[in-house]
Image (cartoon, rainbow, N blue to C red):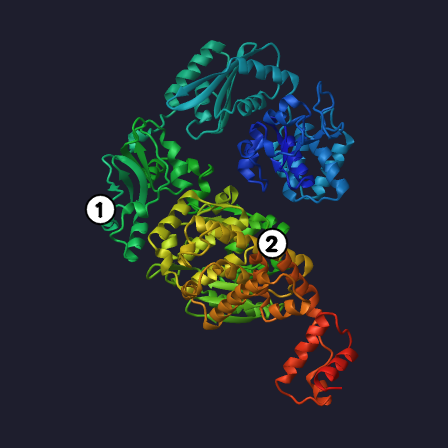
């Protein structure tokens, strides 16, 4: 394992250098050794750049073989990674611009240059190697250079820093972003004022709001004190602060706030000042510094509106259901009290949440007598009576949890509940103050996160794909409909995976739109009226799927869905996983925006496979297999709650209701994955293999056969054993290899294999097993014997034989069969030649050709003339 790290108080230059270093060491993990400065945290939260960092706790120091340290060479500043220095087997590389270090760490490779920033050094290294940077990477590196060089005006700035910035701007660096996150450093006088303010800083709580008060006395004028206060807030991570500064006979008051609960302009009007909600100032000659401070505290105590606590808005007693109640009982209670969401209790403690939507779907699938705990959501947030009401806003708005149980912190018992309606009532009093806050887009757009991605698309997609999307947008505008590209295309775009298989969804008549698009592109259109879908066959041979935005319901568990026209949100809700529910709007005023109704971006970032609702695997059990495919292909993990839903579907045998054809289709897709072995192991963990046959891959040795099949394929690709091979079929044969004939027939029936396919499976397995016995009973074989044993087998059966033989000698025979004997067995003489030689057509032809082939393979003859001579001597008596 290789690790890139930096000093324990990371700034922009640190992170820029880390990201750039990963371009030089692409296999390395980026790990911060300590904390990050606030501006860097703000940058990550605001822009969500596509950089992945690992946590220290996820790094096993014993596995590290190379440590790359950037922006420091001080061993005391890299935290636990200091333990790797001097360790045998660990190579250390350093990139730094700090020249005067008392005890620099010892490194195998050191790149230490006099530059204004480490980002400049890494920019030079990348330029020298011809490594290209994305616009996001260029922007981050420009931030690093600008921050450490004080916007290129520090005395430490070098000509190379200017050159690097020029390259970065040419590469797409966004200087507006640089200006937003980089401020000029404080001068010496301002730093002196900040030190005084910090020494005298006190935190007071006014009606639930923490406010910092700090004072300083100056003997002479110091400019830009507001910048000092701003930097103080950044340094101390304050949400609200007032600075009182005495200069000669006047007290200056400067207020800053980042919280909606405190309007600093209202406060400082009491001192004759004013300003904005989050930034204001005042001054007074009538009060001493002590008097001004006392008056400010009195005003704050009077003006800061007390925050609501949970106990002031929660409902009690709580209508709830028991975990053991049937779903019929739960539905009756919801109807009786006209409630859509209820907490589920075990004793007096909440253990889940159940919604009407989940209950109604379960009843539709005739699960009325099942227990509520079987379909409830077991993961949920709780709160306590003394907590401030604002703490549950993210839970209700961002996490879309409709009710929040209130528990006694001492025993966990339910004491109340807060609903989404309670939240709306509180916010209604002053909803306008959220119009520019962190929840604005969620409130205005029906709880959907929106992000503009046009520049990202232009960067990551080929020009012809972007041109096609522009055409789709233009046709949609002319038709007066909204067009979206959805699903895997959007997911893989965000993951930087090439996937140009596009699904277009139209909020209107998708078939009419497809016809208009086909006319525009001179393409053939094939439509399916029942499902509201069309396929646009483009002139270059590619296809574009177009569908009407639709919702769907299932008439019974595992049924194919019945669809109805609907909105884009409903269309996305029917998708299998959250990261497949993302959509890009292509036209209109908000063209090229990313719509995320169900936290798909979050799950992509967290690398989690998560379903959209509790009955997902009951309605469509095939999603359990797809969850495994995505988990293994993308290196994600199935979420804890989603995994519990799979286990419930398995336990209740809902997977059995999946048709054999659909089960086989999912199995084929798994066997075509780059690494089907890990998928099959995961299927075994989740007890999904039983639905093929209870004995499939039951033992460790069965998985060893699958592992050897993978090794055989690796060998086959290297030495070109087989040109065209159905790898999925070989894996299927390996899965069934340990079963007897009756068990194989049962598995084939379960998978709904055709008679032709069953015969192929049965023959391949029988041939493989019979040939293996013959090989093992013979010590040494002639080439002709090897050829005659294997030539009747399909290539897939022969490769399976290699996997199950357990013999180097047998596998050597098989390699020779593919690489040499196939060519050696080709004959020059044909049937016509034999007739010309006087041999009458009939069974004798087979004998003649076998004799010739055996002689060729055993090296007894080598030419057409020798073939003729052999026929004449053996069959014509010449």
Which residue corresponds to mark 1? Answer: 333
Which quarter of the figure has residue 575?
A: bottom left
- Please give the name of the residue rendered at 74% of the width and 70% of the height, measured from the top-left corner: 859
Instruction: Check the image and report above or below for 596 versus 854.
Output: above
Instruction: Check the image and report above or below for 854 versus 397.
Output: below
Q: Please give left or right for residue 680 compared with residue 750 in the image.
A: right
- Please give the name of the residue rendered at 43% of the width and 37% of the height, measured from the top-left corner: 434
- Which comes sooner in the sequence, label 2 or label 1? 1
Q: Please give left or right for residue 133 compared with residue 217 in the image.
A: right
The quadrant in which the N terminus is found is top right
Query: Is residue 593 at all visible to an observer of this figure?
Result: no
Which residue corresponds to mark 2? Answer: 711
Query: Viewer-nearest of labels 2 and 1?
Result: 2
Q: How many marks?
A: 2
Helix or strand or loop: what does disc 1 sit on? helix
Q: Please give left or right for residue 784 compared with residue 867 in the image.
A: left
Helix or strand or loop: what does disc 2 sit on? helix
C-alpha separation, residue under disc 2 versus residue under disc 1: 58 Å
| Closer-to-camera residue (471/114) | 114
- Please give the name of the residue rendered at 29% of the width and 49% of the height, measured from the top-left corner: 356
Which quarter of the figure has residue 623?
A: bottom left
Coordinates of residue 429 in the picture (x, y in percent) = 35, 35
């Amino acid at each position: 394992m290789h690790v890139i790290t930096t000093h324990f108080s990371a700034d922009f230059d640190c992170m820029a250098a880390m990201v750039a270093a990963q371009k030089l060491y692409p296999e390395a993990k980026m790990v911060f050794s300590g904390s990050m400065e606030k501006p860097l945290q703000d940058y990550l939260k605001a822009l969500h750049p596509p950089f992945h960092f690992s946590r220290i706790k996820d790094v096993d120091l014993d596995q590290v073989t190379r440590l790359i340290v950037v922006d420091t060479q001080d061993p005391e500043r890299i935290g636990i990674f200091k333990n790797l220095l001097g360790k045998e087997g660990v190579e250390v590389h350093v990139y730094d611009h700090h020249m005067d270090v008392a005890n620099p760490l010892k490194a195998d490779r050191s790149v230490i240059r006099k530059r204004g920033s480490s980002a400049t050094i890494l920019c030079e290294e990348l330029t020298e190697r011809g490594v290209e940077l994305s616009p996001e990477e260029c922007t981050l590196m420009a931030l690093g250079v600008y921050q450490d060089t004080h916007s290129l005006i520090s005395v430490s700035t070098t000509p190379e820093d200017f050159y690097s910035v020029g390259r970065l701007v040419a590469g797409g660096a966004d200087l507006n972003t640089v200006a937003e996150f980089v401020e000029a450093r404080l001068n010496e006088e301002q730093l002196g004022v900040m030190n005084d303010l910090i020494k005298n800083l006190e935190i007071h709580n006014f009606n639930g709001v923490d406010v910092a008060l700090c004072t300083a006395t100056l003997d002479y004028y110091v400019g830009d004190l507001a910048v000092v206060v701003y930097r103080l807030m950044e340094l101390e991570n304050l949400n609200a602060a007032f600075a009182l500064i005495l200069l000669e006979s006047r007290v200056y008051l400067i207020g800053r706030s980042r919280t909606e609960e405190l309007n600093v302009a209202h406060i400082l009007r009491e001192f004759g000042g004013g300003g904005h909600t989050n930034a204001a100032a005042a001054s007074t000659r009538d009060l001493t510094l002590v008097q001004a401070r006392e008056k400010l505290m009195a005003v704050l105590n009077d003006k800061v509106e007390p925050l609501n606590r949970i106990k002031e808005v929660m409902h009690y007693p709580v209508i709830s259901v028991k975990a053991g109640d049937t779903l019929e009982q739960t539905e009756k209670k919801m109807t009786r009290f006209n409630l859509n969401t209820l907490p589920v209790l075990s004793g007096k403690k909440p253990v889940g949440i159940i919604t009407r939507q989940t209950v109604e779907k379960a009843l539709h699938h005739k699960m009325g007598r099942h227990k509520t705990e079987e379909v409830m959501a077991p993961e949920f947030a709780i709160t306590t009576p003394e907590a401030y009401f604002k703490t549950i806003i993210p839970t209700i708005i961002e996490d879309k949890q409709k009710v929040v149980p209130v528990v006694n912190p001492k025993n966990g018992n339910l004491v109340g509940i807060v609903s989404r309606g309670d939240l709306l009532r509180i916010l209604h009093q002053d909803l306008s103050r959220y119009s520019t806050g962190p929840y604005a887009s969620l409130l205005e757009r029906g709880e959907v996160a929106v992000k503009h991605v046009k520049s990202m698309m232009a960067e990551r997609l080929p020009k012809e794909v972007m041109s096609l999307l522009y055409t789709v947008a233009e046709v949609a505008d002319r038709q007066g409909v909204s067009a979206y590209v959805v699903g895997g295309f959007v997911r893989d775009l965000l993951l930087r995976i090439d996937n140009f298989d596009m699904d277009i969804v139209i909020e209107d008549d998708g078939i009419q739109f497809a016809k208009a698009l086909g006319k525009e592109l001179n393409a053939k259109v094939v439509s399916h009226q029942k499902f509201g879908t069309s396929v646009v066959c483009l002139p270059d041979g590619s296809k574009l799927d177009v569908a009407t935005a639709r919702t769907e319901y299932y008439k019974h568990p595992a049924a194919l869905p019945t669809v109805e026209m609907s909105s884009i949100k409903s269309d996305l809700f029917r998708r299998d996983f959250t990261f497949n529910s993302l959509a890009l709007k292509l036209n209109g005023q908000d063209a090229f925006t990313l719509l995320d109704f169900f936290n798909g971006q979050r799950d992509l970032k967290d690398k989690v496979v998560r379903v959209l609702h509790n009955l997902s695997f009951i309605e469509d059990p095939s999603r359990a297999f797809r969850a495994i495919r995505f988990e293994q292909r993308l290196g994600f993990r199935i979420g804890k709650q989603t995994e519990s839903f799979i286990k419930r579907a398995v336990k209740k045998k809902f997977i059995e209701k999946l048709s054999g054809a659909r089960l086989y289709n999912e199995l084929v897709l798994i066997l075509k994955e780059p690494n089907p072995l890990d998928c099959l192991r995961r299927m075994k963990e989740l007890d999904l293999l039983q639905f093929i046959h209870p004995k499939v891959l039951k033992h460790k040795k069965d998985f060893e056969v699958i592992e050897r099949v993978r090794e055989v394929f690796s060998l086959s690709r290297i030495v070109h054993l087989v040109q065209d091979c159905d790898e999925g079929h070989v894996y299927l044969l390996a899965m069934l290899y340990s079963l007897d004939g009756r068990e194989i027939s049962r598995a084939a029936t379960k998978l709904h294999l055709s008679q032709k396919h069953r015969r192929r499976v049965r023959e391949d397995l029988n041939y493989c097993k019979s040939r293996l016995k013959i090989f093992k009973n013979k010590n040494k074989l002639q080439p002709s014997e090897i050829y005659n044993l294997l030539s009747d087998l399909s290539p897939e059966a022969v490769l399976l034989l290699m996997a199950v033989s357990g013999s180097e000698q047998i596998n050597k025979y098989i390699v020779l069969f593919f690489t040499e004997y196939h060519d050696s067995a080709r004959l020059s003489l044909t049937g016509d030649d034999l007739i010309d030689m006087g041999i009458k057509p009939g069974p004798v032809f087979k004998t003649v050709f076998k004799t010739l082939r055996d002689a060729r393979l055993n090296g007894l003859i080598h030419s057409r003339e020798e073939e003729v001579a052999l026929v004449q001597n053996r069959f014509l008596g010449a």
